[in-house]
Image: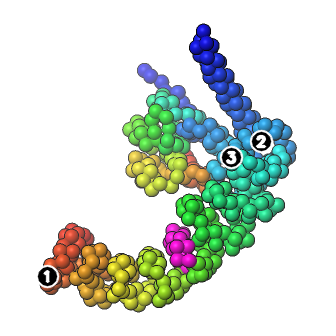
Amino acid sequence: MSTTPAVGPQTILIVEDDEDMVTLLQFLLEREGYQAILASDGRQAHHLIDTLSPPRLVLLDVMLPYHNGFELVAHIRSKEPWRDVPIVMLTADSAERDIVRALDAGASDYVVKPFNPKELMARLRRFLKTAS
Amino acid sequence: MVEAGVVAALFAGVVALQLTKNLRLRRRNQFHAAWRPLLVQSLSDIPQSVPAVRSRDTLNFLFYWNYFHESLLGEDKLVGLNQLARLAGMDRAALKLLKANGLRKRLMAIITVGHLGEQSAWNDLVALAQSPHPIVSLSAARALVDINPKAALPLITPWIGARADWSPPKVAAILAQIGSALIAQPLSEAALVVAPDMAMRILHYLEVTRCTAGLPAVRTLLARESAETALKVACLKLIGQFQDPKDLALVRSFISHSDESVRAQAAVALGTIGMPADEGLLISLLADSQWDVRYRAAEALAHLPLMQHERLAEIHARQHDTAAKQILEPFLITAKSAPSK
């Protein structure tokens, strides 16, 4: 029987390849009492999705090495224990095509970079309240 | 023997270059690793003290600090990030670099003083904004807006009309940052007094910033007998896009203009603000000598309020002119498959 390592109830998965952005997001989340687990590319994220129990929320960049954000959304939505996890996508600009594609792929919401930290946290809280 | 020496010297040169590059990269990464937590922390706690920045790391600091500034929106970021830069002496360093010879250094300084809201850099920035270099001048204009948008606007308005080399999306972003309520009057007033090519550039910015408050000046420009054809077309385009019903009579008056591009643009505008009563005017253009005018008239006719496939088919059947019939046909097919209005 396979066992899936459990993550804490306040855990958020950040999938982002920009180290500075990761530090920033991690800081914003930890300040609000959440614990962040990090994946710096699509392959690492894929592995975490396959091996971990689902987190409270996934914060997912669009442009990633190996697997892009859209592929990861599809993978998450196809995987039973992760299927209902809220996914908030981070897009580099407000290109309508990217946003529509992200929402079509199954993302719950999106945030355009550069972002306002307060707005990002407000959007995340909306999903985190529902998830709890 | 000599060849072997040359190869060895080249090899040593390549290795030295690679080592220098690696060393520079390692130093930059170490610098980022040291400052990353401080920069992030400054977003919530205003720092009281910071480590000293060595002069060789000044550009590294400015680049990294500006990266954080540009990654975030909102007023909250400003206090802590700016305090951190001032504590590190980077405000003074940036002011000095405004006069540097290197383009990279000068640009970094311009962006920094803008983000810092450094009032003492104002006069230097005004001079830099008139530089022939498009990136330097545009960055300086943006920095002026960052420091004081109201005071910057009368300065940058004539430059916006005059500088054909400024990137339109970047100018539009600066204008959007100031806000359409503030830019409407100075921009539209400038459009009335500058040369036609400059006026057209200004009209374009009124269009992309959706600055509907600039419409009165656009109407004045359009009504001028002396206005160039291209300017009339630009005015009609803007009026059609802003869709103010008050402009209907003005647009109608250009349907029979002597220039075909004006007639075509008037037809386009009528397609967006026209009423069912404009059917006759547009039908009269279906037999125009110019294909583009006929096409725009047919398109506008199909888009008139309450226009249905049946009515369009009736209009089509009543046309005796072959060109008029032909130009309506694709719109007839589209209207047949479109849901009822």
List x then y, in percent, for residue B251.
40, 86
The residue type indicated by label 2 comes to Thr
Q: Relative to residue B61, is residue B24 depicted above or below?
A: above
- The residue under label 2 is B58
**Is residue A51 in view?**
yes
List x then y, in percent, for residue B306.
29, 81
Image point (78%, 63%), residue name: B122
Question: In screen coordinates, is B41 left or right of A122?
Answer: right
The residue type indicated by label 3 comes to Arg
Q: Which residues are magenta?
A: B195-214
Q: Secondary structure at mark 3?
A: helix
Question: In screen coordinates, is B12 left or right of A1?
Answer: right
Give the letter of the chain under mark 3.
B
Q: Which mark is residue B104?
A: 3
Give the letter of the chain under mark 2.
B
Residue B266: quarter of image: bottom left
Image point (81%, 39%), residue name: B55
List x then y, in percent, for residue A45.
50, 33
Q: Secondary structure at mark 1?
A: helix
- The residue under label 1 is B317
* Magenta residue check for B139: no
Mark 1 on the same chain as mark 3 = yes
Residue A7: quarter of image: top right
In front of the other: B324 or B99: B99
The residue type indicated by label 1 comes to Ala
Quarter of the figure with the C terminus of chain B: bottom left
Q: Main secondary structure of the magenta part?
A: helix
| Disc number lying in front (1 or 3) | 3
Q: Distance between the Cα atoms at labels 2 and 1? A: 76 Å
Image point (58%, 34%), residue name: A38
* Magenta residue check for B203: yes
Look at the image and name its color scheme: rainbow
